[in-house]
Amino acid sequence: MNQTLGCELADSESDDKGAELIGYKGRTVRDKLDEVISVKDYGAKGDGITDDTTAIQAALNIGKAVFFPEGDYRVTAGLALPDGHVCITGAGPRKSRLLVNHTSTVISYTSTHRRRQAVFKDFSFVAVNAGSTLALNVVFPVTTGLDQIQLIVENVSVSIESGGVWAQGGIRCENVTNSIFSKFVMTGTYATTQYGISLEGQCLNSTISQSRSTFCKMA
């Protein structure tokens, strides 16, 4: 599925999977720009020094597609996504980096609706302390007979820097149906048990391609 189209189709709650969004009505450039907000519009600096947690959370709370321009964004507490369709993108995993300096899950998303869609693309999580727990936690309700893609993770990396350690893992998914993981890379040091991608509960039809996880046990 085209990822841009995926974010657009996610704007529909109905069982027709957003077909009406690709009909006759065209959209202007201004319409398209209004759909995506930048974390810098909400005060994030991306300088690797300023604590950008509050600014990033403010952007996420709006419930639109959120973009991380090139920069290092220091995060000192867990971030929670609203229960809706979400699309989080950056300028690339080497250009848009979340510097994780806390011991909670970095981004948490819990949906109560089976036809939500979550897209994460083109950014990275970098642990800069020894207690970072989990990069991304995604939870959906149990469902059957669903042909819509619920989760897309593309060109996302999880790594360490300056003595950082991921204590738990990269991505945890619970009850996710029709998920796609492409170009996901996790490298780092672990203290106990760690995973790149964990599929828990009722996870159906998961596709993982061009991805890898490389860990070194902490002495």
Image: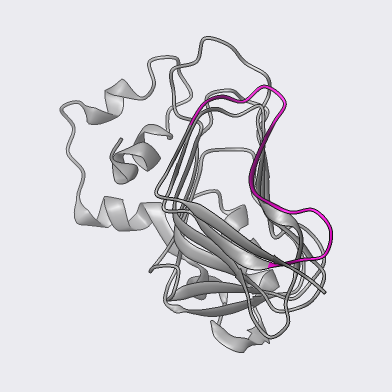
Residue 204: in magenta span:
yes
Q: Nearer the viewer, residue 94 or 6?
A: 94
Give the side of residue 146 with respect to residue 27, left or right. right
Dominant SS of magenta comes to strand
Residue shown at the point (68%, 28%) measured from the top left: 112
Relative height, residue 71 to residue 36 (above, below) = below
Give the side of residue 167 with respect to residue 124, left or right. right
The image quadrant that residue 217 belongs to is bottom right
Residue 102: in magenta span:
no
View extreme (top): residue: 145
Quadrant (top left, top right, bottom left, bottom right) of the N terminus? top left
Which x, y percent locates residue 86? Answer: 52, 45
Relative height, residue 136 to residue 37 (above, below) = above
Q: Which residues are magenta?
A: 189-206
Which x, y percent locates residue 10? Answer: 43, 34
For the rendered model, the colour scheme is one colour
Residue shown at the point (39%, 68%) measured from the top left: 92
Which x, y percent locates residue 79? Answer: 70, 59
Q: Nearer the viewer, residue 30 or 86?
A: 86
Quadrant (top left, top right, bottom left, bottom right) of the C terminus? bottom right
Callout count: 0
The image quadrant that residue 43 belongs to is bottom right
Residue shown at the point (72%, 26%) measured from the top left: 201
Q: Nearer the viewer, residue 166 or 191?
A: 191
Give the side of residue 8 with respect to residue 203, left or right. left
The image quadrant that residue 77 belongs to is bottom right
Which x, y percent locates residue 119? Answer: 47, 45
